[in-house]
Image (tube, grey):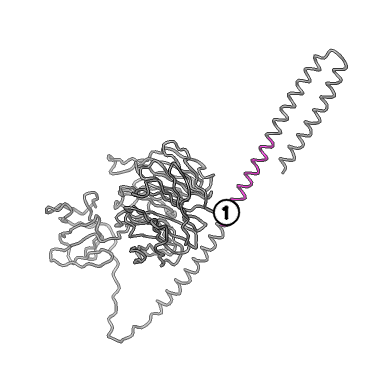
Amino acid sequence: MANSGGHEGAAVSCISLSPSEDLFVSGSASGVVAVHQVGGDVGALHTVSVHGSLVSALDLGRRDLLFEGDAHGSVCCTRLLLNSDDHGGVKAEKKWELKAAHDALDITGISSTDEGRVVASSGKDECVRLWDVETQKQIVKLEGHKGWVKCVAVATSSDEVSSGNLVVSGGRDKAIKLWDIRASKTREVHNLLGHTGWVHAVDLSDGPSYPKIVSCSGDKTVRLWDLNNLKQESIMQGHELRVWSVAVNGSGDLAISGSSDGTMRSWRLAGHSFTEKIVEKGDDAILAVAMTKNGALAVSGYDSGVVRETWLESSVSEAYDASGSATVTPPEDVFEFPELQPVKMDIQKPMPAFHVGQGPRLIVGSEQFRVPGLLTTKSGNDSQSMRVSSMLPLASKPPPSRPEVPQTSPGASIPHSTTTKESAGDKEALMSRVREMEAKIEEIENQRLEMEKKYIAAVADANVKSAKIAEQDRAIYSLEERLRSLDVGIKQGTGERRILDETVALSALNDRVDSLLSRMDMLLKN
């Protein structure tokens, strides 16, 4: 299911699912943060806020708290309130905002602990910072990356790694760093090396012992890291351009990734081997992805402003119409029926998708989700068994017809298509152009980094000059006090000699004041 997500065509730069996985949020370059219901109606339930700059990081954590980071270096905390009397709407209550949390430089990543009491943020000031959600005070500043820190993730639950004790970050220096942030010691645990491009995103599984890390990079790869031995487990190659976002399921055996090549790919992991599958494919770059813990549903955000939900796993084990015939077309989980008849389904996971003949796509849900126009009733003793008692048309486009594969006799050759060659050539030219643009983007980012360094140096220099000027101001004030004291002495003097001495001293002080004022002018000019 795809929708505009309330972003009006602005690139969707970040996405986060709630721990209960009934809501997700998306943030865009327009400064909009939108709240969506998983499997709900097209569009956003609510627009949480409109920032003055790009929303660069989101985390929807426990206690209904939404943490946001933007391009001005601010970290915001907003409480989301579900509105039972407003058809499932959402209200937003802003709790606090930390302005210039990363020295007024961009926030690039944000992640909260499982209990929602600590939030970690990464930024272009080359560090990761941890904040106390209740007091808004900085707990610790983690330094070690050489260049921008592009992403951060906090371990949420593990027997070996306590919630919130492990922080993972990745950056421009192509390194992934592990941090132990227990109260007794805050230190860098390990430096994971292997990527040959910027590390754009990291995510952690909720494994029963040691969680696993999945990362993606400008080197077009997705990589799996085993925290048990602190080694790289798999290198997943397939994307044709840089990979912007990655997510892993709870058990650590399924990952998804989004890339500039317009594809979202799933990676079924088994030790050092993996199975790749293209889940989505289009012309727009996929900048953000998220996935449910069971690996059934993926949510993606596009450069065009579109937000899309995609079911990754099989949803239905059995389906048939009144005539007893049904066609299953994997891997899309599409069941086609020749007649519009009642259908029985054994639902293993919520939200299977159906095409009825050439008609609209219908969504059948569990007790938590309902779709207007589709009436369902429970049947039998199995609470997961549902019977469709009535099907009504929904406003939707019919499924695209599948091209027929030409039948050829053994040994016969299939004629080459000039259109295919031209399309392949056009695609290669487009990919070449995209690679040129990515190289230009990297060049511009490097130039911006240099400008930021010069700006920081200029600010530091200005602060030094301001301190010197303040010192001169204090000296002048002290001299003026002495001048006033001499004036009083002159007025109260009883002899000509005292008046002469005081006049000489006053003249010397005036000369010194003139000298100090001249030095101040020179400082201000420089």
Measured as percent of width and height from the top left, residue 18 is found at: 34, 48
Q: Is residue 276 visible?
A: no
Q: Is residue 25 visible?
A: yes
Image quadrant in which the N terminus is located:
bottom left
Q: Number of marks in the image? A: 1
Image quadrant in which the C terminus is located:
top right
Q: Is residue 455 magenta?
A: yes
Q: Secondary structure at mark 1?
A: helix
Q: Is residue 522 magenta?
A: no
Is residue 436 shown above or below 391?
below
From the viewer's side, name the closer residue of 257 and 437: 257
Q: In which quadrant of the rendered view does residue 507 lie?
A: top right
Residue found at x 81% / y 17%: 490
Residue sitting at the far bottom: 411
Measured as percent of width and height from the top left, residue 364 is found at: 22, 56
Residue found at x 11% / y 54%: 380
Residue sitting at the far top: 494
Relative horizontal placement of residue 502, taking residue 36 as reference (left or right)? right
Q: In which quadrant of the rendered view does residue 225 lie?
A: bottom left
Relative horizontal placement of residue 508, taking residue 253 as reference (left or right)? right
Amino acid found under the numbered disc labelled 1: Leu
How crowded is the residue under tag 1: few (<14 C-alpha within 10 Å), some, or many (20+)?
Answer: some
Residue found at x 38% / y 38%: 93
Chain part drawn in magenta: 446-469
Q: Of helix, strand and loop, which mostly describes the magenta segment?
A: helix
Name the residue carrying label 1.
Answer: 449
Measured as percent of width and height from the top left, residue 245 is found at: 42, 57
Is residue 345 shown above or below 127?
below
From the viewer's side, name the closer residue of 351 and 392: 351
From the viewer's side, name the closer residue of 51 and 275: 275
